[in-house]
Image (tube, rainbow, N blue to C red):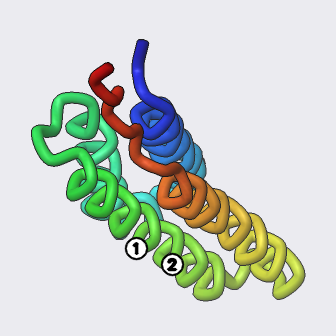
């Protein structure tokens, strides 16, 4: 049976992938001119999400994915701000939605840090 720390770590990784997938989906529906400009950031987030599963250093891979997701989220907001067809209220909504998504990652990280390591069984 996996330890509580392993289960929470796996849940945090799954959440990180879900957030990255959501950001990637937002990128895919952008107008072509914005999509092309952000393509390298979207590709980086996708690659980091796909490589998380088999990563030898899972914590590092999660941190890399989190950083790529934050970068893509910031670029999505910048892109919306630069788009004359997107009004200020829509930009604010997008910013808040993405901030909420990224906060979910922080919450998962805090939960994982609070799990106490399992103690080895004492010999009797």
Q: Which residue is mark 2?
A: 74
- For residue 98, what is the image quadrant? bottom right
Q: Residues within 10 Å of mark 2 (few under 14, many from 20)?
A: some
Mark 1 touching mark 2, by CB under 8 A?
A: yes
Residue closest to the eye, 60 or 84: 60
Residue closest to the eye, 25 or 21: 21
Q: Residues within 10 Å of mark 1 (few under 14, many from 20)?
A: some
- At mark 2, the secondary structure is helix
The residue at the point 83 percent across, 87 percent down is 88
Find residue 89 and report its horizontal and vertical position in percent: 89, 81
Find residue 32 and report its horizontal and vertical position in percent: 47, 56
- At mark 1, the secondary structure is helix
The quarter in which the C terminus is drawn is top left
The quarter in which the N terminus is drawn is top left
Tag shown at residue 63: none
Left or right placement of residue 33 versus residue 124 in this view: right
- Whether 54 is drawn above or below 71: the answer is above
Q: Is residue 24 visible?
A: no
Q: How many marks?
A: 2
The residue at the point 27 percent across, 53 percent down is 59
The residue at the point 26 percent across, 39 percent down is 52
Residue closest to the eye, 94 or 65: 65
Q: Which residue is mark 1?
A: 71
- For residue 108, what is the image quadrant? bottom right
The residue at the point 65 percent across, 67 percent down is 103
Find residue 8 and report its horizontal and vertical position in percent: 51, 39
Q: Is residue 124 visible?
A: yes
Cα separation between marks 1 and 2: 5 Å
Q: Residue furthest left?
A: 56
Find residue 84 and report its horizontal and vertical position in percent: 70, 84
């Amino acid at each position: 049976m996996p330890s509580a720390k392993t289960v929470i770590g796996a849940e945090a990784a799954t959440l990180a992938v879900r957030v990255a997938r959501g950001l990637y989906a937002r990128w895919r529906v952008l107008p072509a001119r914005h999509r092309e400009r952000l393509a390298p950031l979207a590709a980086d987030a996708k690659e980091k999400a796909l490589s998380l599963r088999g990563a030898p250093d899972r914590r590092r891979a999660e941190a890399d994915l989190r950083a790529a997701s934050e970068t893509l989220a910031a670029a999505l907001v910048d892109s919306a701000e630069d788009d004359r067809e997107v009004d200020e209220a829509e930009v604010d909504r997008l910013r808040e939605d993405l901030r909420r998504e990224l906060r979910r990652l922080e919450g998962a990280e805090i939960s994982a840090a609070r799990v106490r390591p399992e103690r080895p069984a004492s010999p009797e």
